[in-house]
Every structure is written in structure tokens, then in C-alpha cells.
């Protein structure tokens, strides 16, 4: 009889020992019984015959996780404090016994007949630089031609009979990028994202399995597909927060891509117009300046709270009269962020979370953007009974509604997660905007994510001061990056005006076209305190019983305070104390090295502790 340690896929439990009369290769996917349920697992190691009784493996599946996948899963499990089964759960295995086509076959179809991409001298210099370094940053201004460099690099990788993984922050980037990639590389491109239908996923996987997919593109999940013969990984918009998973395993796909580069011995390219300070400090970079289309941008600053001021309305009116398009950025969805009583100041909060609820006029409801709890908009204050309720902090839906009322004969559309719920809606909205069927596009961060809007001559940016005021050591970086990214969507082919509402004009003005200088100054601010010079770890404790959550935190805190290699920066109730009817407490740790944190947390960890290495959320 053979004995194997089986990691249960997507389970937080540690591996269990099972028996099998057959010999099984390590990495093989199997089916086993667990508490009267049949579940899938992976044979991660052999075992001696244990002293206890073991169950038999029910089925040996035709899938296998390679030794490199297992090594990657072990790294994710250790670094991000999850089980091996959870780490393997984000990956798709290889099909054992799959037939792969001969290496010299023409797998690109007609796409090989297309002319090769021609780069400018500067772009060629950048490409040569990237090829010389195992991990490098392409620091290129918006519209400077980063995508052309990626595509030229993909061509060269295909010539070497290898495949490339092309990561993009989220689904919002896929339609236009998909079009460009398919136009040039044809069927050699596979797009992968969560909005694909089961049939589309099946077809995409078939191409990955048979080796005809030479470029696998998509958000972070594309990194874990069974791609054969990887030769290059490109992480576009590397600064984007959506690369970080908000649930276990809480990995950052950019950092995993860098680790995979070392594991597979391949090059990794990180690209951005506004790179994160961590990437800028840690890796060699090449600077690509100037837009691909030379255009002039005029920045106008207005000292004002979030409101559609006369200056904004007049600018939009001028743009409409010239038959030109505009975009308006707001960091807040819905009509308004908060519903407040004008008499007693009471904010209407979610009954399950300690946060104010957002006003959604279209559905006539208050909605919590944390737990999705929804209720009808009240007619009077729940505290004092006053009917005098007012809304604060303008949201995208309200801005779009006000603009449509102001400019009746124009087409105003909302572009955020409330309006764009499917890939089809996204594709359709972008097509209508580029076909000039939409005059004003109003959206959140989604509006700034790498889309090419060729006809935009006015960009309006609101809400930056709220971003600057966040309790986050990256608040300055995030606010400035957002402004640069939104501004970059305008004036792609002609001159443009960028209207910015802020009381912090001096800060934005100083760095708007000198992001390198900002990064150099930010380095001094972060030294000895924050990443990339220190490692941070946030430990969350949540429970319906607040006393239990607090007790767990205190128990772990006492142990951590005895560990000399880590510093407890702070502890206590979370800024948002209650989410989804659970009370939340936290500990924030700081150390020189991640190994110090891993060791200390491993020694002190308690049952309720949810560990977030390299956190990006502090709410």
C-alpha cells in the first residue's frame, strides 16, 4: 500500500494522509472523501505508513501540477499565510498525456503573414534594455508606445518557440487590448478573465493545452494557467491595486510574476506611466518620455469641494459646442456617498457595517459598498425624526444625472461598476464612445485604466483631496497617479484641457509632468518607515462577537511584543470597525525583512488571525 499527503483544493486545512494501492506521481490531482463529501485534492508528498487508519484515494484524475507549480504554491502558502490547498486552488493543472504539436509547426495561422511591428529609435533602445535585465521597469509616459514595445517583444519570443503571459490590471483593459493583439497575432492570442462563459474558457484552455496559444493575456488569474514553455511575463500598469487579491490567498500578482521569473529563469517586464515607488526603487528602469502623438495639455486648477461648479459646466459646454468629447472622473460611485441629517448631523450607516451607505437614486435605495446590504431611502432621520436629510460627496450617478439635465441634447453616460456589469456592456460603451455617440463619459477609476479615447479634449477630475486625505502611506502616490492616468486619457491626438478641483494645487502642479521627481522626493519620506524600505503586515481579527475578536487580537499581540525582530506599529479597532455584521480588530507589524515577519507571525498566530502580507488596504 502507498501513502500520500493530499492537499485539499481551496481548503484552509493542512494536507491529510490517504492510501492507494496504485503508485501516484507527486502533483497528481485526485478525488478523496472528506467528512462524507467527495472533494478534489493534490498529492503533494509521499508518506510512511501512519499509526492511524487512513481512507483510500477514490479516483486518480488525468491532471497534474508540475514541480514548478508545486514550488510556486509552497512559496504562496508560506509568504501569504494560506494553506497549500488554497495556493494550489488558484492554479489550473496540466492535462497529463496531452499531445502537443511539433515545435516547427506553423501555429499562428495567418498572423505570421502580417508585417512585423516597427519601433522608433527610442522604443528600440527601451526593448534592448528590457532584454538585458531579468526584471526591469518600462517607465513610459501615457501614450509613449509601451504596448508596441510589448508586442515587438512578444514577436521575438514567438520566434524562439516560446509563450508569453501578458497581465493587465482587470477586465476593463481587455476589449481594446484584445483587439490590438488579435489584429496582429491572430489566433495565437488567448484572452482569459472571469467574465468568459464556460464554453469560452473550455476553448481557451484547449488552445493553451495544445500549445497554439502563444500569448496568454488577462488579469491576475491568467498568471496561473497551464501555459507551456513560458519565455516572458509582462505586467502592464504594474502599480494597479487590482493585482492584489483581497481574499485568501492574499497574493499580489505583480510580485508573483517576479518570483515566477526567477523560478522559470525568464524575463519579467513591469510597465507603467506612474510606477509604484517599490518597483522604481527595486528594479532597473528605462524612461520613455512624451506621448506617441505629440499633443499639448493645459492644466486648470479650481479651489473647490466636489461639485459641478460653473467653471466645469462652462468648460463642458464649450467642448460640446465644438462637437468634442469630455471625460469626468470621480472616485465615488452612486449618487452621493452619504445621507446626513441637516439638523442633528446623523449619518445613515449600514446596519451590518460601521460605514455610511451610498445613495442610489436609480434603485431608490441606500447601498453599502462593503457588504451590499440595501434598504429603501428613508424619508426622515432615524435619530431625531427630522425630514431634513441632505446628501454629501458627489458620486458618478448623480454627476451623470445633473449633466444630462444641464445638457439635454447631449449624450451623457455613466462608466463604473454599477453601470458596466458585463464584458459585453464594457465593449459596447467603449465602442459608442470611440464612435462619438457619447459626448460626456462620467466614471470612477475604471475610466483611467489604459483605454484609448482619441477624441477627448477635456478631462475633469474631482475628489482628489479625499484621496489625499486617506489614512494610507501611499495617499500622495495614489492621488497623483490617478490624476496623471486620467489626464493621459485626454489629448491623445489633439490639444486638451485638464480641469482639476483641489485645494492642493501646489502639490499636483509641482509633480504633474515630473513623476520621477515625485518618486525621488517620496523616497525620503518613506525611508526607515514604509515600503520599499520596510516590510508591512496587517493582521485582521473578525467575529460576530466583538469580545472574541478583541481577545484573539490581545492574545497574539502579547506574543508579538516579545519578538524583537518585528515592531508593532499599532493595534486596536479597525477604522471601519464592523463589516458584514462582524466586529474587526487589527495589528500592524513592521520589520526590515519579510522573513522576520513570517517567523514572528508563525510563532504567534492564533485561530482568528487573517494575515495580509504587504497590505494595500488600511480601512
Image: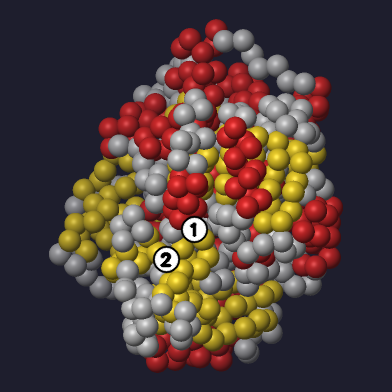
Residue occupying image coordinates x 27% and y 50%: 30
| 11 displayed left or right of 276 | left
Q: Residues within 10 Å of mark 2 (few under 14, many from 20)?
A: many
- The answer to whether one can see residue 584 in this image is no
Residue 77: give x, y in percent of width and height.
48, 61
- Looking at the rendering, in which quadrant would you find the N terminus? bottom left
- The answer to whether one can see residue 405 in this image is yes
Residue annotated with mark 1: 395
Q: How many marks?
A: 2
Say which of 329 and 233 sits in front: 329
Dot 1 and dot 2 residues touching (CB under 8 Å) = yes
| 307 displayed left or right of 5 | right
Say which of 127 and 277 sits in front: 277
The secondary structure type at the circle numbered 1 is: loop
Residue 502 to residue 353: above or below? above
| 534 displayed left or right of 191 | right
Residue 54 to residue 271: above or below? below
- The part of the image, by quadrant, that contains residue 94 is top left
Residue 358: give x, y in percent of width and height.
42, 66
Residue 29: give x, y in percent of width and height.
32, 47
- The part of the image, by quadrant, that contains residue 498 is top right
Residue 5: give x, y in percent of width and height.
35, 60
| 101 displayed left or right of 595 | left
Residue annotated with mark 2: 358
**Sequence-first disc among 1 and 2:** 2
The secondary structure type at the circle numbered 2 is: strand
Residue occupying image coordinates x 41% and y 82%: 583
Say which of 550 and 267 sits in front: 550
Q: Residue furthest left?
A: 36
Say which of 585 and 500 sits in front: 500
Amino acid at each position: 500500500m502507498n501513502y500520500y499527503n493530499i492537499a485539499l483544493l481551496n481548503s484552509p486545512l493542512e494536507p491529510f494522509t490517504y492510501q492507494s494501492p496504485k503508485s501516484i506521481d507527486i502533483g497528481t490531482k485526485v478525488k478523496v472523501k472528506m467528512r462524507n463529501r467527495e472533494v478534489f485534492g493534490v498529492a503533494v508528498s509521499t508518506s510512511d505508513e501512519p499509526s492511524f487508519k487512513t481512507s483510500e484515494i477514490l479516483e486518480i484524475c488525468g491532471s497534474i501540477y508540475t514541480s514548478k507549480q508545486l514550488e510556486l504554491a509552497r512559496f504562496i502558502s508560506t509568504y501569504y499565510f494560506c494553506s497549500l490547498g488554497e495556493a494550489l486552488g488558484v492554479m489550473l493543472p496540466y492535462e497529463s498525456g496531452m499531445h502537443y504539436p511539433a515545435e516547427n509547426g506553423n501555429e499562428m495561422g495567418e498572423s505570421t503573414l502580417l508585417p512585423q511591428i516597427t519601433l522608433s529609435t527610442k522604443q528600440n533602445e527601451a526593448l534592448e534594455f528590457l532584454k538585458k535585465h531579468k526584471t526591469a521597469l518600462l517607465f513610459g509616459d501615457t501614450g509613449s508606445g509601451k504596448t508596441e514595445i510589448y508586442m515587438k517583444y512578444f514577436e521575438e519570443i514567438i520566434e524562439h518557440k516560446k509563450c508569453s503571459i501578458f497581465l493587465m490590471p482587470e477586465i476593463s483593459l481587455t476589449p481594446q487590448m484584445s483587439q490590438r493583439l488579435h489584429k496582429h497575432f491572430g489566433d495565437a492570442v488567448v484572452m482569459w478573465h472571469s467574465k468568459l462563459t464556460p464554453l469560452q474558457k473550455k476553448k481557451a484552455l484547449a488552445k493553451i493545452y495544445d500549445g497554439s496559444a502563444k500569448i496568454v493575456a488577462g488579469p491576475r488569474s491568467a498568471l496561473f494557467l497551464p501555459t507551456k514553455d513560458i519565455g516572458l511575463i509582462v505586467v502592464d500598469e504594474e502599480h494597479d491595486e487590482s493585482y492584489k487579491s483581497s481574499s485568501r490567498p492574499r497574493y499580489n500578482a505583480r510580485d508573483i510574476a517576479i518570483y515566477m521569473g526567477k523560478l522559470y529563469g525568464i524575463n519579467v517586464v513591469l510597465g507603467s506611466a506612474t510606477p509604484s515607488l517599490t518597483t522604481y526603487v527595486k528594479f532597473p528602469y528605462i524612461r520613455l518620455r512624451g506621448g506617441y502623438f505629440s499633443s499639448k495639455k493645459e492644466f486648470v486648477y479650481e479651489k473647490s469641494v466636489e461639485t459641478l461648479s460653473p467653471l466645469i459646466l462652462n468648460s463642458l459646454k464649450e467642448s460640446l459646442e465644438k462637437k468634442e468629447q469630455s471625460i469626468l472622473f470621480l472616485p465615488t460611485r452612486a449618487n452621493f456617498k452619504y445621507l446626513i441629517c441637516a439638523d442633528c448631523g446623523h449619518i445613515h450607516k449600514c446596519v451590518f457595517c460601521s460605514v455610511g451607505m451610498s445613495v442610489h437614486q436609480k434603485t431608490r435605495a441606500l447601498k453599502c459598498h462593503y457588504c451590499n446590504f440595501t434598504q429603501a431611502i428613508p424619508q426622515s432621520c432615524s435619530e431625531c425624526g427630522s425630514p431634513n436629510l441632505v446628501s454629501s460627496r458627489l458620486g458618478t450617478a448623480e454627476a451623470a444625472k445633473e449633466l444630462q439635465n444641464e445638457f439635454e441634447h447631449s449624450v451623457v453616460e455613466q462608466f463604473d461598476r454599477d453601470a458596466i456589469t458585463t464584458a459585453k456592456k464594457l465593449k459596447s460603451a467603449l465602442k459608442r464612445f470611440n464612435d462619438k455617440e457619447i459626448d460626456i463619459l462620467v466614471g470612477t477609476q475604471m475610466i483611467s485604466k489604459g483605454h484609448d479615447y482619441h477624441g477627448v479634449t477635456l478631462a475633469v477630475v474631482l475628489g482628489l483631496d479625499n484621496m489625499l486625505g486617506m489614512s494610507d502611506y501611499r495617499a500622495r502616490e495614489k492621488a497623483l497617479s490617478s490624476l496623471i492616468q486620467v489626464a493621459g486619457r485626454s489629448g491623445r491626438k489633439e490639444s486638451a484641457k485638464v480641469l482639476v478641483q483641489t485645494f492642493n494645487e501646489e502639490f499636483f502642479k509641482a509633480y504633474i509632468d515630473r513623476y520621477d521627481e515625485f518618486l525621488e522626493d517620496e523616497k525620503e519620506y518613506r525611508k526607515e518607515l514604509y515600503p520599499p524600505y520596510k516590510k508591512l503586515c496587517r493582521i485582521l481579527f473578525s467575529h460576530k462577537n466583538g469580545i472574541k475578536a478583541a481577545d484573539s487580537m490581545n492574545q497574539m499581540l502579547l506574543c508579538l511584543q516579545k519578538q524583537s525582530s518585528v515592531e508593532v506599529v499599532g493595534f486596536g479597532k479597525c477604522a471601519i470597525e464592523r463589516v458584514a455584521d462582524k466586529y474587526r480588530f487589527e495589528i500592524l507589524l513592521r520589520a526590515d525583512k519579510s522573513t522576520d515577519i513570517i517567523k514572528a507571525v508563525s510563532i504567534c498566530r492564533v485561530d482568528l488571525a487573517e494575515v495580509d502580507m504587504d497590505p494595500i488596504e488600511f480601512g
